[in-house]
Image (cartoon, helix red, strand yellow):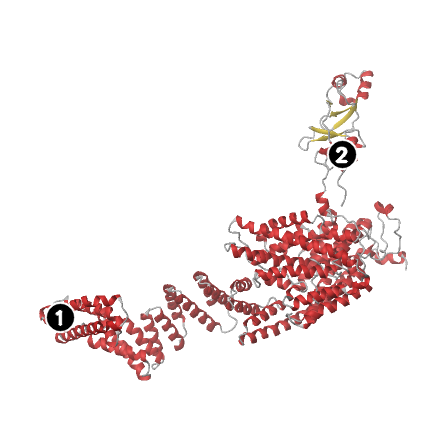
């Protein structure tokens, strides 16, 4: 072949460019097949390693699981599930910095992802960063979930509230609880959960309301009855407390806490000298009984103080005894009894006696006395 | 370095036809018209990039498949395959290198440079095939080498295969090698800017605007191809760096110093062992890669499989705090040992990835140690590891500009630039002072070649016109009369004078000519009217002295004028002034 014969075809650059383009297209086709095969193989390897990691995680072999999650991610870089599992495993093994890097990388890709936000929230919670935790948890609550969105959102919400309570951020926790209670589906288990959390933040009004809502749906729900009784008890609404606690005790008579609370509530109601509707004779009788019980308690504690470890409160007992002795004749005189200030002065002394003798132990009667002395007119009428 | 077989003939351009008498004319596949050559070369650069990109994708797949097949999907220490694979493959590779592909030893950077400067850009296609096979086997089996330099050589070889039959001028044919090299390296690194800079800094060895277009085009097209197939994520991801206070830069300066010293140790070890092992009897060369493989396998077996192969995933893990600073320091030391062994035994593979690995581990270790004592430092391990990569790149490979851009490109993070520049500067200065010859230049000299080096050029003192110019004598004005001018020069010692012409330009007149004008009775005429209209060429003080050589033989006195005012004379140069400057003895080449 000589140059002259080649000239007509090949002297034009377009011919060469066309030939090179054709070659490049063929090359692309071939490499595409290779790469597809490669990617499939890598993904299969990644799946295998991920599964191994999950198995090891379940078996409690966390370092090995971590390694396999990491390897899985090496073979399938963009797999969010693997990266999330790796981040969780890292977080659980205390490598929070690395976990955060992975999670931030995931978050940058899908900032609305509920699971990623939840993981970031947990990480922030672990580091006790209140604002960051709330931010990520809220993003998780209102984010996108690929499966069981309602369940996951509620769980995230409950987790956040639990975190806030543990951090003593009660106002924030209460705010979250009020919001969640308004959005809860009508399910007794969720109602109970919210009511319990209200009780934990000592918002007994809302707790009682939530327990009642549960009881509207399930009248014999033991946990709701006991919870409602407890909330009413803490609110000083002993008659209501007795109502719920009796029902709870009727279902489960072996619950000591319920029984004791019931006993105390009944005692409070039976000994309250300020109860509306009782006669002056009865009020006098109740005051006298409270006063005598307090005196007896004071004597018992003074007699047994030698056997208990020394406590500063015990030093005040003789003075209290003197005060009690001084008040006793006043109790006998009807004039003083009828004066407005005397019952309160008496209850003051009872309260101080109960407080100072607490180191000698207390029973239901003592608790009732204490509550009566503390609350006085606040006891449910 | 093994020399390639005789290069195929290349068409001579008129400018260089006298310098290549051995070249013969043969029938061509393609004749390019001289006018279209420049543009067609640019088009070809794009195709070179595409094919280099495809080749590099295949190369990476081959390495990965080999690695999985030989070492397993998740290499674990205390397994027999880790111990055996590098050694067995080392034996196979040495047979292939000695008997079939003698040009594929080592990294490939120097071979490409030699192709450009000695073999008219010629790198046989067989080299690409051999490099592909042997490097994939070596790296895949765990030899401590990287895929970047082989990709560079594969790209250069492919470029030759595509371009040599196009009947380009010799100048263009020579450029095929760097164009292909840039494409191969850019594809391997997924970093076009670094590849272009590296090829300019290390392969071409000089700044040349003429080649920049085609190199950039080929680099970009190869990166596009690689990203098409393998994605466009940056190689490493770290959180953005926020420097709380400027004093934190001291921590990075310390890293630069440590990195510079490590780079010197690394370079000295490689530079010392390479010629010695090559001088051993030929039969030992069959076993050298195998022995290196055995030692590397043993390191992996006892608990450090991270140092095997290119190790990119471990660099990523180091950046994400997976290792303590002590482990990172051990890994950096072991990697220097493993890479030195792999490289000096002639196992085909590159130095880039190991350099990055050592840098990342060392950076992480130094950062970890510094944060141990100064917990307020805001940089993460990832930040220090990335800066460490740049440091080793600057200190070991001695490519300061590439090192900065490389870090930016592989991380996609601009916030890190200040620490990188600072640390790299320290590493570069330390390395240059303790190891005067850059590593690739050292290899070149060990191979008995003398190729240009950008670092040497940088260090050369360039002479300028201002170095040779003399103060001007009396300057005549073209508006003055011949009589006045003649009187003006009476007391002057020289025989030739510059004349400032109106409205601009310069001319010269000799004492003899002025005497003749006076003798001819032209006293009352202005000097300007008596002189020829042709103006003298002029120079500026900052011009290179070579430029003066073009003019000093046309006229005995060349005016050196200010750039701000062409009528203001700064000095004059004559041929004698220029030559006297060149006669000053200069530093002899090393």
Measure the C-alpha gap from mark 2 to mark 1: 124 Å
Closer to us: B346 or B420? B346
Position above or below: B529 against A85: above
Q: Residue B125: x, y in percent?
A: 80, 60
| Relative horizontal placement of residue A26, taking residue A304 as reference (left or right) | right
Query: Mark 2 or 1, which is nearer the eye?
Result: 1
Label 2 sits on a secondary structure element that is helix
User: Which residue sits at x=72%, y=51%?
Assistant: B202
| Relative horizontal placement of residue A121, taking residue B275 as reference (left or right) | left
Classify residue A371 by image quadrant: bottom left
| Relative horizontal placement of residue B443, taking residue A317 as reference (left or right) | right
Q: Which chain is mark 1 on?
A: A
Q: Which chain is mark 2 on?
A: B
Q: Are marks 2 and 1 in contact (CB under 8 Å)?
A: no
Q: Residue B212: x, y in percent?
A: 72, 49
Residue occupied by mark 2: B581
Q: Residue B472: x, y in percent?
A: 72, 26
The count of marks equals: 2
Label 1 sits on a secondary structure element that is helix
Q: How many residues crowd around disc 1 within 10 Å: few (fewer than 14), some, or many (20 or more)? A: some
Classify residue B392 by image quadrant: bottom right
Closer to us: B227 or A371? A371
Q: Residue B242: x, y in percent?
A: 53, 53
Residue occupied by mark 1: A328
Position above or below: B246 against A164: above
The N terminus of chain B: image quadrant:
bottom right
The C terminus of chain B: image quadrant:
top right
Closer to us: A132 or B162? A132
């Amino acid at each position: 072949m000589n140059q002259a014969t080649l000239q007509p075809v090949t002297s034009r650059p377009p011919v060469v460019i066309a030939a090179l383009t054709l070659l490049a297209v063929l090359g692309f086709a071939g490499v595409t097949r290779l790469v597809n095969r490669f990617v499939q193989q890598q993904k299969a390897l990644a799946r295998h390693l991920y599964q191994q990691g999950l198995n090891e995680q379940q078996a409690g072999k966390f370092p090995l699981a971590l390694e396999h999650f990491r390897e899985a991610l090496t073979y399938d870089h963009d797999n969010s599930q693997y990266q999330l599992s790796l981040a969780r495993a890292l977080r659980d093994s205390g490598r929070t910095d690395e976990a955060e890097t992975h999670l931030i990388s995931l978050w940058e890709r899908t900032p609305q992802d509920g699971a990623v936000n939840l993981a970031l929230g947990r990480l922030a919670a672990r580091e006790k960063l209140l604002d960051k935790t709330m931010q990520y948890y809220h993003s998780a609550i209102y984010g996108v979930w690929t499966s069981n969105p309602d369940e996951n959102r509620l769980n995230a919400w409950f987790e956040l509230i639990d975190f806030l309570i543990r951090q003593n951020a009660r106002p924030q926790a209460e705010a979250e609880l009020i919001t969640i209670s308004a959005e809860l589906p009508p399910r007794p288990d969720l109602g109970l959960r919210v009511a319990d959390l209200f009780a934990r933040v000592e918002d007994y009004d809302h707790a009682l309301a939530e327990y009642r809502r549960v009881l509207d749906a399930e009248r014999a729900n033991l946990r709701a009855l006991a919870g409602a009784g407890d909330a009413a008890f803490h609110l000083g609404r002993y008659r209501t407390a007795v109502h719920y606690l009796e029902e709870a005790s009727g279902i489960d008579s072996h619950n000591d806490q319920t029984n004791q609370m019931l006993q105390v509530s009944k005692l409070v109601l039976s000994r309250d000298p300020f109860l509306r509707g009782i006669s002056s004779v009865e009020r006098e009788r109740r005051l006298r009984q409270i006063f005598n019980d307090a005196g007896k308690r004071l004597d018992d504690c003074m007699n047994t103080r030698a056997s208990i470890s020394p406590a500063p409160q015990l030093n005040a007992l003789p003075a209290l005894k003197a005060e009690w002795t001084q008040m006793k004749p006043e109790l006998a005189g009807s004039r003083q009894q009828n004066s407005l200030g005397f019952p309160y002065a008496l209850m003051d002394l009872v309260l101080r006696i109960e407080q100072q003798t607490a180191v000698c132990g207390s029973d239901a009667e003592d608790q009732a006395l204490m509550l009566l002395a503390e609350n006085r007119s606040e006891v449910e009428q | 370095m093994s020399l390639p077989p005789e290069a195929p003939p290349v068409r001579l351009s008129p400018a260089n036809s006298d310098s290549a008498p051995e070249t013969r004319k043969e029938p061509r596949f393609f004749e390019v018209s001289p006018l279209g050559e420049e543009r067609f070369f640019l088009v070809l650069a794009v195709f070179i990039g595409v094919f280099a990109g495809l080749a590099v994708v295949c190369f990476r797949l081959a390495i990965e498949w080999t690695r999985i097949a030989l070492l397993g999907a998740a290499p674990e220490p205390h397994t027999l395959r880790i111990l055996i694979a590098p050694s067995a493959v080392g034996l196979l590779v040495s047979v292939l290198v000695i008997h079939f592909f003698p040009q594929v030893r080592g990294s490939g950077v120097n071979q490409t440079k030699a192709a450009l400067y000695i073999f008219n850009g010629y790198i046989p296609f067989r080299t690409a095939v051999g490099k592909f096979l042997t490097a994939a086997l070596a790296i895949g089996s765990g030899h401590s080498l990287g895929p970047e330099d082989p990709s560079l050589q594969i790209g250069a070889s492919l470029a030759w295969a595509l371009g040599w039959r196009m009947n380009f001028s010799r100048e263009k044919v020579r450029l095929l090698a760097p164009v292909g090299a840039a494409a191969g390296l850019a594809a391997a690194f997924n970093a076009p800017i670094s590849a272009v800079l590296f090829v300019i800094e290390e392969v071409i060895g000089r700044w040349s605007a003429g080649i920049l277009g085609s190199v950039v085009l080929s680099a970009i097209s190869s990166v596009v191809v690689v990203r098409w197939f393998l994605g466009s994520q940056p190689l490493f991801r770290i959180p953005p760096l926020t420097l709380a206070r400027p004093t934190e830069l001291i921590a990075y300066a310390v890293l630069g110093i440590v990195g510079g010293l490590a780079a010197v140790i690394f370079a000295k070890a490689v530079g010392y062992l390479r010629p010695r092992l090559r001088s051993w009897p030929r039969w030992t060369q069959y076993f050298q890669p195998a022995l290196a493989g055995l030692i590397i396998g043993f390191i992996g077996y006892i608990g450090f499989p991270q140092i095997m192969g290119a190790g990119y995933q471990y660099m990523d893990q180091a950046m994400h705090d997976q290792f303590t600073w002590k482990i990172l320091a051990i890994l950096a030391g072991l990697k220097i040992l493993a890479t030195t062994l792999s490289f000096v035994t002639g196992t085909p593979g590159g130095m880039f990835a190991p350099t990055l690995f050592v840098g990342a581990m060392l950076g992480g270790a130094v950062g970890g140690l510094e944060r141990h004592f100064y917990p307020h430092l805001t940089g993460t391990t990832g930040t220090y590891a990335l800066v460490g990569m740049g440091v080793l790149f600057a200190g070991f490979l001695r490519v300061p500009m590439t090192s900065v851009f490389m870090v930016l490109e592989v991380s996609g993070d601009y916030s890190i630039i200040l620490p990188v520049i600072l640390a790299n500067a320290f590493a570069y200065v330390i390395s240059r002072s303790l190891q005067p010859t850059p590593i690739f230049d050292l290899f070149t000299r060990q191979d008995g070649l003398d190729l240009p080096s950008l670092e040497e050029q940088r260090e050369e003192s360039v002479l300028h016109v201002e170095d040779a110019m003399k103060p001007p004598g009396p300057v005549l004005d073209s508006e003055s009369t011949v009589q006045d001018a003649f009187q003006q020069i009476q007391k002057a010692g020289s025989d030739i004078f510059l004349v400032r012409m109106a409205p601009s330009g310069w001319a010269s007149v000799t004492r003899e000519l002025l005497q003749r004008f006076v003798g001819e009775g032209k006293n009352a005429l202005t000097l300007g009217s008596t002189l020829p209209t042709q103006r003298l060429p002029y120079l500026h003080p900052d011009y290179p002295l070579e430029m003066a050589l073009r003019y000093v033989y046309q006229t005995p006195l060349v005016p050196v004028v200010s750039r701000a005012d062409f009528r203001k004379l700064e000095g004059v140069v004559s041929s004698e002034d220029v030559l006297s400057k060149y006669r000053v003895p200069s530093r002899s080449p090393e």
